[in-house]
Image (cartoon, grey):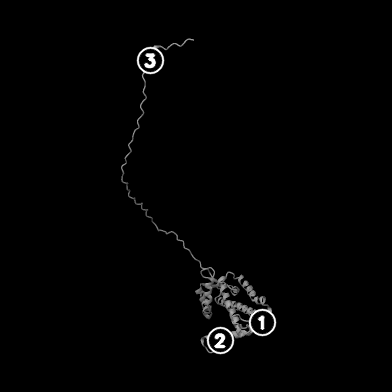
């Protein structure tokens, strides 16, 4: 096997004599100086006045105003004279009903008055028991007017007690009405109830007004039913015979009670009997 021939001499010399190429130097980084911003004063711009509105010719109409109208409730009083008599008899019926029922029960169930210690079948003992019944009747009128605005007799006659400012009457207004009732019973209340406002002195100071209620049709029926129920309590609780005896005691002792009531103002005023 023969070896390859050696390269020619001319080509070897050309290769040896070939110059070397140097790589270019790396580029230098350019340094940029930071910009220097000189401070300047702020530019002040004067506010421009708003353009004036063009003149309007004609009559300037103001915007409509909203008015709130507070309607006062309209009360129904009916005929003035009949209204006054209805109020008077309603109070008498309430007091008579409750006082007679309480006195009848006390006479039938209690032999001696627990306050005075007197027997109930004597004149003085019966007087004390009847006075207790009247006191309970006045409390009944006060509570019923304060909570319900009416009583049994007022329901019968279609009357109702209203608070002028609305809402229930309340214990305070009802108490003022009852406290001034004796003064109103001395003619002044009837005269004031005949005036256009139809309010007696107790109504003016108590902030109340009495008029026909909303239960005008159903109220009298309910009033008569309650009257019969309350009037029958002595028969149910004490029995028919003791209740009849208590009514006989009323017939026996009532003239003495009326005589004492007649002499009371003479005794207080020092007038001759």
| In the depicted structure, whether residue 4 falls above or below residue 78 | above
Earlier in the chain: of badge 3 and badge 1, it is 3
Residue at numbered disc 2: 263
Q: Which residue lies furthest to the bottom in this view?
A: 272
Residue at numbered disc 1: 245
Earlier in the chain: of badge 2 and badge 3, it is 3
| In the depicted structure, whether residue 39 falls above or below residue 14 | below
Nearest the viewer among 86 and 121 is 121
Mark 1 → mark 2, Cα distance in angstroms:
28 Å
Q: Which percent across, then down, holds residue 195?
A: 51, 76
Mark 2 → mark 3, Cα distance in angstroms:
171 Å
Q: Which percent across, then down, holds residue 22?
A: 36, 23
| In the depicted structure, whether residue 267 falls above or below residue 224 | below
Q: Nearer the viewer, mark 2 or mark 3?
A: 3
Q: Which percent across, then down, holds residue 31?
A: 33, 34
Q: Which percent across, then down, holds residue 258?
A: 59, 84
Question: In the picture provided, is 206 more to the left or to the right than 157?
Answer: left
Earlier in the chain: of badge 1 and badge 2, it is 1
Residue at numbered disc 3: 14
Mark 3 → mark 1, Cα distance in angstroms:
168 Å
Where disc 2 sits, the SS reads helix
Q: Residue at x 39, y 14 (%)?
A: 12
Q: Which residue is drawn at 62% across and 71% down?
A: 222
Q: Which of marks 1 and 2 is in front?
A: 1
Nearest the viewer among 56 and 248 is 248
Where disc 3 sits, the SS reads helix
Where disc 1 sits, the SS reads helix
Q: How crowded is mark 2: few (under 14 residues within 10 Å), some or many (20 or more)?
A: few
Q: Can residue 194 be seen in this view?
A: no
Q: Quadrant of residue 168?
A: bottom right
């Amino acid at each position: 096997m023969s070896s390859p021939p050696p390269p020619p001499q001319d080509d070897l010399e050309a290769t040896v004599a070939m110059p070397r190429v140097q790589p270019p130097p790396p580029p230098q980084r350019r340094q940029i100086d930071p910009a220097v911003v000189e401070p300047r004063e702020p530019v002040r711009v004067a506010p421009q006045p708003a353009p004036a509105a063009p003149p309007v010719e004609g009559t300037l109409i103001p915007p409509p105003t909203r008015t709130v109208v507070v309607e006062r409730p309209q009360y129904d009083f009916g005929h003035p004279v009949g209204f006054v008599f209805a109020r008077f008899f309603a109070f008498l019926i309430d007091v008579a009903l409750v006082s007679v029922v309480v006195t009848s029960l006390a006479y039938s169930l209690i032999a001696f008055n627990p306050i005075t210690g007197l027997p109930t079948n004597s004149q003085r003992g019966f007087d004390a028991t009847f006075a207790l019944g009247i006191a309970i009747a006045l409390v009944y009128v006060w509570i019923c007017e304060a909570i319900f605005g009416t009583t049994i007799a007022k329901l019968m006659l279609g009357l109702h007690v209203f608070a002028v400012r609305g809402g229930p009457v309340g214990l305070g207004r009802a108490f003022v009405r009852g406290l001034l009732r004796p003064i109103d019973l001395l003619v002044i209340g009837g005269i004031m109830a005949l005036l256009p406002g139809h309010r007696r002195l107790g109504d003016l100071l108590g902030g109340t007004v009495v008029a026909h209620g909303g239960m005008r049709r159903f109220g009298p029926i309910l009033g008569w039913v309650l009257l019969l129920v309350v009037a029958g309590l002595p028969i149910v609780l004490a029995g028919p015979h003791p209740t009849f005896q208590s009514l006989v005691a009323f017939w026996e002792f009532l003239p003495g009670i009326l005589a004492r009531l007649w002499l009371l103002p003479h005794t207080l005023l020092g007038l001759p009997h």
